[in-house]
């Protein structure tokens, strides 16, 4: 058996980032920037008010705490007040985001005033510059923002849009094919005896899409070496990478690894990884195309995806951060397993414990066919070989989902008719 880290490193060493492309900003969400962006004009582009209120001239010698000023006009967001002249003793009604009129040097919040006809009584004089958002206070002109490998999140896209960017230089979006193998897999609604529905392909397609890559559904292929060869050969022609599941074990009809070995001129390595689940894993290149041969058991397939495929796809996308975070959490049950030379990845739910820490609870049976346990989990508890961790003690967890556990609701609390829980 090979250590997990060695297999991850081997995989990443054989996967390359895709080339740079110009991408319309509207299509760039979830991609990664190829380099920093030059800020040509400042953000915000002009001095503007942070509050609704009155723009005033402090230089007109206003010192008393209660002052009445004559209101000579209104400036709304989007107006151009550059022609306005504000004399001593005058104020301008101004709305959040509106440009600061020339000559005014502070804005009084409307809450600190009383309107008196065409005048305004000011109860508290602001400091010079108070409530003014200066041009360039977010990003000055001439600066660069966002280094290579920055993910275009909604906020990053917002910043790029505020800079006026219409196209951005990103790394290309990889196309990832997903094929399932196995004579038992059926698309029929009513299953014939011995057949099962394919769960790996849908789960893997969504896993790929969640990373920002293009997931291509290449269907199922039976346990027939000729059919598998044809399906794989066609797939590597059209995809930047291929994910297969099933047929990498030591069963009599496990043809995937044999076909991959043949197609790749023996460049495919079949690993026995020192982990549980997901011990068997085949990886290599067919031509230039990386191929990931995942095990067929549904939990194993997704664990293998998490550990080997996810970082690889992120590397193809040009991401800087390839790995999920690991955290410490207190286990709510005692964890142990017989020494077997493997790192155990126990599917668990990590939650905030209400006193500033995290707790983790294993979910469901831990068999590699029990996908519901994984569906209820947001983490893998990383239990080293032979380790025994008493309830209440800290363990290392690999966070694979979000902490708000928004995805899972137990069947004991069905949604009521009005949609509320
Ligand atoms: P294999 O790795 O091909 O030996 O398959 C191991 C186990 O996973 C068997 O019980 C298969 O029926 C099951 N399996 C394989 N592929 C899938 C799939 N796409 N969806 C659901 N179960 C699968
Ligand atoms: Mg099979």
Image (cartoon, rainbow, N blue to C red):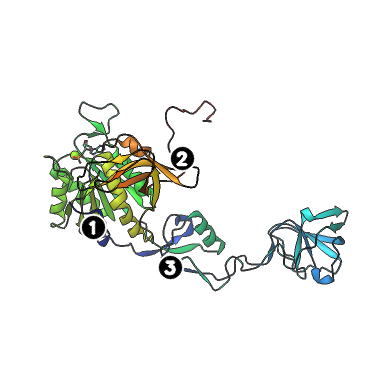
Near mark 2 (Cα within 10 A), the count class, few <14, some 14-19 or many ≥20, is: few
- In the image, which is nearer the foreground, mark 2 or mark 1? 1
Q: From this viewpoint, is residue 218 visible?
A: no
* SS at mark 2 in the image: loop
Is residue 311 or residue 392 the one in the foreground?
A: 392
Q: Ligand 2 quadrant?
A: top left
Whichever of labels 2 and 1 marks the residue nearer the N terminus, that label is 1
Left of 157 or right of it: where is 234? left
Residue at mark 3 to residue at mark 1: CA–CA distance? 30 Å
Residue indicated by mark 2: 406
Residue at mark 2 to residue at mark 3: CA–CA distance? 34 Å
- The x and y percentages for residue 382 are 31, 48
Asked if marks 3 and 1 touch (Cβ < 8 Å), the reply is no
Determine the residue positioned at 32% across, 62% down. Answer: 17
Residue 11 sits above or below residue 219 on the image? below
- The x and y percentages for residue 193 are 21, 26
Left of 314 or right of it: where is 162? right
Residue 118: image quadrant is bottom right
The numbered dot on residue 6 is 1
Residue 204: image quadrant is top left
- In the image, which is nearer the foreground, mark 3 or mark 1? 1
Residue 193 sits above or below residue 129 on the image? above
Residue at mark 2 to residue at mark 1: CA–CA distance? 34 Å
Is residue 391 or residue 157 the one in the foreground?
A: 391
Left of 66 or right of it: where is 103? left
Asked if marks 2 and 3 touch (Cβ < 8 Å), the reply is no
Whichever of labels 2 and 3 marks the residue nearer the N terminus, that label is 3
Residue indicated by mark 3: 35
Left of 172 or right of it: where is 253? left
* SS at mark 3 in the image: loop
Is residue 28 or residue 266 the one in the foreground?
A: 266
- The x and y percentages for residue 74 are 78, 59
């Amino acid at each position: 058996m090979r250590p997990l880290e060695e297999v991850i490193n081997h995989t990443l060493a054989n996967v390359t980032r895709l080339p740079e492309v110009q991408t319309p900003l509207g299509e760039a969400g979830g991609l990664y920037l190829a380099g920093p962006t030059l800020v040509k004009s400042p953000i915000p582009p002009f001095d503007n008010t942070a509050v609704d209120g009155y723009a005033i001239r402090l230089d007109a010698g206003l010192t008393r705490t209660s002052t009445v000023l004559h209101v000579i006009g209104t400036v709304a967001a989007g107006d151009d007040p550059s022609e306005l002249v504000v004399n001593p003793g005058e104020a301008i009604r101004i709305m959040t985001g509106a440009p600061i009129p020339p000559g005014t040097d502070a804005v009084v919040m409307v809450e600190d005033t009383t309107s008196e006809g065409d005048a305004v009584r000011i109860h508290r004089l602001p400091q010079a510059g108070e409530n003014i958002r200066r041009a360039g206070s977010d990003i000055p002109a001439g600066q660069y923002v966002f280094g290579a490998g920055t993910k275009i999140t909604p906020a990053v896209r917002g910043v790029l849009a505020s800079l006026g960017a219409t196209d951005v230089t990103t790394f290309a979006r990889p196309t990832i094919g997903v094929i399932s193998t196995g004579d038992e897999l059926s698309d029929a609604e009513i299953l014939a005896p011995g057949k099962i529905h394919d769960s790996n392909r849908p789960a893997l397609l969504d896993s790929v899409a969640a990373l920002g890559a293009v997931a291509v559904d290449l269907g199922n292929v039976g346990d027939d070496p000729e059919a598998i060869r044809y399906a794989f050969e066609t797939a590597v022609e059209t995809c930047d990478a291929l994910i297969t599941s099933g047929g990498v074990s030591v069963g009599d009809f496990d043809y995937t690894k044999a076909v991959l070995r043949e197609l790749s001129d023996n460049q495919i390595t079949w690993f026995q990884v020192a982990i549980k689940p997901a011990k068997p894993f085949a990886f290599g290149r067919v031509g230039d195309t990386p191929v990931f041969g995942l095990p067929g058991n549904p939990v194993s397939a997704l664990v293998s995806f998490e550990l080997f495929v996810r970082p690889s796809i992120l590397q193809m996308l040009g991401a800087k951060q390839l790995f999920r975070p690991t955290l410490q959490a207190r286990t709510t049950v005692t964890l142990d397993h017989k020494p077997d030379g493997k790192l155990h990845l126990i599917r668990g739910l990590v939650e905030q414990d209400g006193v500033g820490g995290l707790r983790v609870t294993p979910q469901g049976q831990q068999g590699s066919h029990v996908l519901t346990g994984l569906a209820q989990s947001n983490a893998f508890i990383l239990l080293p070989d032979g380790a025994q961790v008493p309830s209440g003690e800290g363990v290392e967890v690999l966070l694979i989902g979000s902490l708000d556990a928004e995805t899972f609701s137990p069947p004991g609390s069905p949604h009521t008719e009005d949609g509320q829980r």
